[in-house]
Image (cartoon, rainbow, N blue to C red):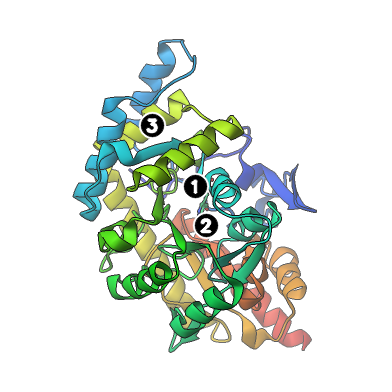
Amino acid sequence: MDFDIEWDHRGLSSLKWEFIVKDGEPQPWDGTDARLGDNRTLPMWVADMDFRVAEPIISALRERVERGIYGYAGKTERYLQAVSTWMETRHGLSIDPDWIVPTVGIVPALHMIVRRFTTSRDSVLIQRPVYYPFSYAVANNGRQVVSNSLQLVDDCYEMNFSDLEKKIKDHDVKLAILCNPHNPVGRAWSTKELSKFGEICTRHQVLVISDEIHGDLVLPGYQLSSYGMLDPTITKNSIICTAASKTFNLAGLKTSNLIIPDAALRAEMKSEILSTGLWGLNPLGLVATQAAYESGENWLSEVLSYISDNHEYTRQFIAQHVPLLHVIPAEATYLSWIDCRKLGLSDPELQSMMMRDARLYLDEGSIFGPEGEGFIRVNLACPRSLLEIALFRLKSAVEEQGGRQ
Ligand SMILES: Cc1ncc(COP(=O)(O)O)c(C=O)c1O
């Protein structure tokens, strides 16, 4: 696959390329149109890749579309087998296919989990700076967010375990949402860290949701430790969230899977899904996920190598040409977390500098929580040519900013 190709995204209703979020609502937007030349904005925000998906997925979808029948779909033995075989061969995680509960996306599942397993007086623990829909899932359901915030130590984000235990006790926490690997800080948590987290949560009977949607996007040299690989006394009270959507760029197909080892917990979750009416599988999502897991491995290793090179290119470019900024080393994901605090700008100022001066549409750090202030998250799953333009624009914008100060 040629990841250098700049595909035309216009006319696809692409959230990343054809919309801009204003007051929390995506609005149609043509600011990224290639016809604007140097004046176009480059979208490097939402976690979609700019790459065309693996050929086996396209041909499986083509075949399915050609049949011309798009009625309701259910999970098949083959689908469940494809998911469980992938988890076993890719990550060494043995699961019984019965443990798999398909859902229409991880974010909807998180909302359902919060509703089902907490009451309106409860607090839910997250580790900011973190993927902002975690907070939405809690706040949209009228629960309180408690953050066991990550600490940046020697260029590496770490969990604060004494704070974790204190927050659980002080707020009588019943539910914690873990991001593994972590979006946006790029950590692939080690088994040691996860065990410690799991032991504390188990001691206080906290249900742990391990969102492993980026689990296949661990960069060469690192490894995913799935929360599901921990001791069964720990995993008993857990739900692992997984999907082919980030890995294989299928997010619009709205198909994901929960892995729930405990039968009682699984029954509760299925009942919650029924109560929301969001049951069933998108037939195209099913076909694409199955094809991805059955035949997408080569494409994945190629894309990971391309993304890893983009990370390295970004790190070197910033270190050499924009020394006021600093790239936090990434172990996983195609997202780069960049420290801009030395610019001394507020987050609105930083955002406006990126949009107005650099013409880059990025995710500003503060949306991941106040712990992210002064940072930006840049999506590197794009052709190198676009990344080069983006980094040169970033360099010029920072230089102009320096001139202004
Ligand atoms: C950590 C994390 N969880 C969930 C999602 C989205 O999941 P879904 O599209 O299945 O709702 C994302 C998307 O970027 C993510 O980064």
Q: Disc 1 marks which residue? A: 50
The amino acid at mark 1 is Asp
Whether tag 2 and tag 1 are in contact, CB under 8 A, the answer is yes
Q: Where residue 238 appears, x then y in whole percent?
A: 39, 56
Q: Where residue 86 appears, x then y in whole percent?
A: 25, 44
Q: Tell me where residue 344 sits by quadrant.
A: bottom right
Label 2: few (<14), some (14–19) or many (≥20) C-alpha neighbours in 10 Å: some
Q: Disc 2 marks which residue? A: 386
Between 177 and 122, the one lying in front of the other is 122
Q: Where residue 278 appears, x then y in whole percent?
A: 56, 32
Q: Disc 3 marks which residue? A: 288
The amino acid at mark 3 is Ala
Label 1: few (<14), some (14–19) or many (≥20) C-alpha neighbours in 10 Å: many
**179, above or below 55, in the image:** below
Between 236 and 227, the one lying in front of the other is 236
Q: Where residue 107 appears, x then y in whole percent?
A: 55, 48
Q: Earlier in the sequence, mark 3 or mark 2?
A: 3
Residue 280 visible to the viewer: yes
Label 3: few (<14), some (14–19) or many (≥20) C-alpha neighbours in 10 Å: many
Q: SS for tag 3?
A: helix
